[in-house]
Structures are given as C-alpha cells and as structure tokens.
Amino acid sequence: MPNDPVSTTEDVVIRQMRDQVIDNDLKIMQALNQRLALVSRLRAYKEERGLEFVDASREEWMVRYLQGANKGALSDEGLAEIYGHILELTKRETAR
C-alpha cells in the first residue's frame, strides 16, 4: 500500500543520505587529526624557541577570516562557536 510507513532502515533515500553524512563526518575527523598534527609541530617549534604557544590575536583573526570565507549555511555565530571548541580541544590534545 502506498501509505504504509517504511522503516528508516529500509528507506533507500534515508540510507543514502546517512551514508553521505558519515562520509562527511569521516572527512571532518581526518581534517581534525591533520590539524592536530600540524598544530603539534607548531607548538613544539614555538616551545623550542621559548615562544608562547597561544596567540589570542591570531585566533581572533582566524575566526574572522573563516567567517569571511564561509559561503555555506553555517552562521558566523555557529562558526565562531565550533572554532572555539576546536581551539580548546587543540590546546588540550597538543599539550599531551
């Protein structure tokens, strides 16, 4: 019958969209891991030279730069929020 509900696990469109979401999530995870590796190298370099690791003005610039480059559905506020989390996570993860 056309009005019979279809299980979300059986719906082909839902399954395809979920597959696309998880593929995107894997790319986000890979990009975050790459970011952590790069920042770890930067942190080590700065520490070897006695420089402060955190540069608040650079962080602020980066968020503004990304907001200007953002052409998607993510709002400026949302972008600032997610990068706030990413920056805090990066500081914790690279301190290990």
Image (tube, grey):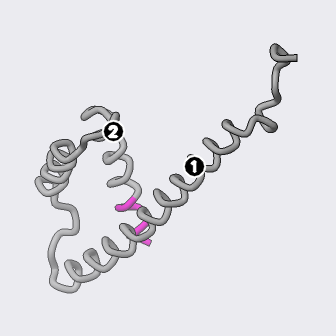
Vertical arrangement, residue 66 with respect to residue 13, above or below: below
Does the CB distance between marks 2 and 1 fall below 8 Å? no
Amino acid type at mark 2: Glu
Q: Which residues are magenta?
A: 90-96
- Quadrant the N terminus occupies: top right
Give the quarter of the image for residue 3. top right
Residue most extreme to the top = 3
Residue sitting at 19 percent across and 47 percent down? 69
| Position in image of residue 75 (x %, y %) | 29, 32
Please rate how many residues cluster around mark 2, counting C-alpha atoms within 10 Å: few if below 14, some from 14 to 19, many from 20: few
Which dot marks residue 20?
A: 1
| Position in image of residue 46 (x %, y %) | 20, 78
Query: Does the stretch in magenta take in 34?
Result: no
Vertical arrangement, residue 86 with respect to residue 17, above or below: below
Q: CA gap, disc 2 to disc 1?
A: 24 Å
Q: In the rendered view, does 76 fall on the left or right side of 12?
A: left
Give the quarter of the image for residue 94. bottom left
- Quadrant the C terminus occupies: bottom left
Vertical arrangement, residue 68 with respect to residue 44, above or below: above
Q: In the rendered view, does 93 fall on the left or right side of 64?
A: right
Secondary structure category for the residue under label 1: helix
| Position in image of residue 90 (x %, y %) | 37, 61
Near-viewer residue (89 or 11):
11
Amino acid type at mark 1: Gln
Residue sitting at 16 percent across and 60 percent down? 55
Of mark 2 and mark 1, the one earlier in the sequence is 1
Residue sitting at 30 percent across and 80 percent down? 41
Which dot marks residue 81?
A: 2
Query: Does the stretch in magenta take in 92?
Result: yes
Secondary structure character of the magenta stretch overall: helix
Secondary structure category for the residue under label 2: helix
Residue sitting at 21 percent across and 62 percent down? 54
